[in-house]
Image (cartoon, helix red, strand yellow):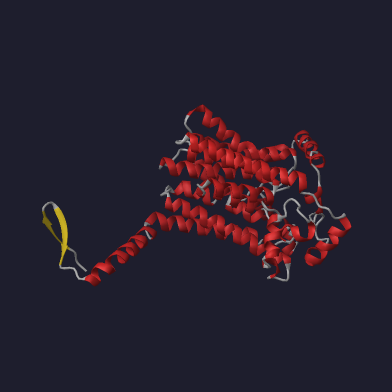
Amino acid sequence: MQWHFRVLSGKHKRTNVCLSQRHASLPTWKYNDLVSRFVSNYSVRTVSIFIAALCFASIVLNRWVVTDLDVLSFGRVWHLYVTYAEFGFIRRGFVGSVLSETGINSIFSNEYVFAYVIQFIAILLVVLLTASFCIRKNLTDPLFVIGIAFSPAFIIHSGYTTGALDVIILLFALLNILYIRNVFVFSAVVVVGIFTHEFFLFTLPAQFLALHIKYKSDKSALMHAHFIAFASAVAATLCVLMFGEVSLPEAQYRELMRLRIPNAYEQHPLWSGYFEVSSSVERNLKAVHELLMATKDGKILFLIPSLLYAICLTLRACRYMKGSGETVLLIVAVAAPLLACILATDFHRWTAMSANLALLLTLSLASREGNERSKWNAPLALFCLLAPFGSAELERPFPLHQFVLEQFVSF
């Protein structure tokens, strides 16, 4: 198809073009442009990097193939089956309620198989959303993209931290930081996140900072956005604190869960989830004693690699901030998940989430500045060799590396 133009009175007029050509040209142009953008070098490279990271995360997720625990290596699965309809409005019951009411968690007869499938789908969504964001925002620096995709705290770590709702929390935080601009949708995600797991509260400073960056050019809109989102967070938190308690005796609760997840019955000390949905803040504060004991025993040294990683990520993100005030806000937002150490001792989980918030904020800030290149990209990419970071056991900061080393020594 050829286009012919002639100039008349300073205007371009098309000639010798039939009606069918005119109607066919625009869709063809749009299609060709879309294909051209997709197959460009940086797009293919970015997609390839994230596919490789997904494959790595899948290997880590399916470690049951090589472990003595078999599928039990997933950990707890109760959070995918507990439901408001049977247990009342309890904390951490949102995801299980959705899966139960829709019947999705009845697709597989074995609850562990279902848990692996759900975990993979959640990781896949994180990969798709992150890769799509990088491509759409033209974040093309190879070291930057590798440092995101193969981060020891992000995608691959999500393949290791099974038996919890961490990947769901990460997914909600990712949506609010990178994608959602409408304050009402933002607030809805905040409410759902708090109902999913109260730890989501520690990710809110980073989400509010992202909201601040989106609206800071309009002070009036910024004030209204913060008020609506903050009010929603407070209301959801009060609902969980005041009404989020299990009303059933422990024996009855455990019996109901035995019927719902028979394959998981007594397979884990916390298999039923009763401790998580019923424990008080005072009871959780015992974690402070464990933290002090870890410090006294020198075990806190195991936390240095992940903390150092989070600090380096924060320093890279700080270069995008305008003024000392915004820099302080960024540091506070990234450090907020570490406060969870007061309530629970899963140190590696909390430092990994801090690192993830720094990664997500960096993605958002770099896309706005149009510059993802930094002197920090190379050293941060080297941290990927440590992937994945650990979870609950303080003595296992690098579980994959330690497992391989232990198998080699025993062999």
Count of labels shown? 0
Foreground pick, 34 / 91: 91
Residue at (88, 55) in percent of width and height: 249
The N terminus sits in image quarter: bottom left
| Residue 54 picture location, percent across and down | 55, 58
Residue 201 in view here: yes
| Residue 241 picture location, percent across and down | 75, 44
The C terminus sits in image quarter: bottom right
Q: Is residue 75 above or below residue 342?
A: below
| Residue 205 picture location, percent across and down | 60, 38
Classify residue 81 by image quadrant: bottom right
Residue at (70, 40) in percent of width and height: 340
Residue 348 in view here: no
- The answer to whether residue 341 is left or right of residue 169 is right
| Residue 57 picture location, percent across and down | 59, 57
Residue at (78, 51) in percent of width and height: 277
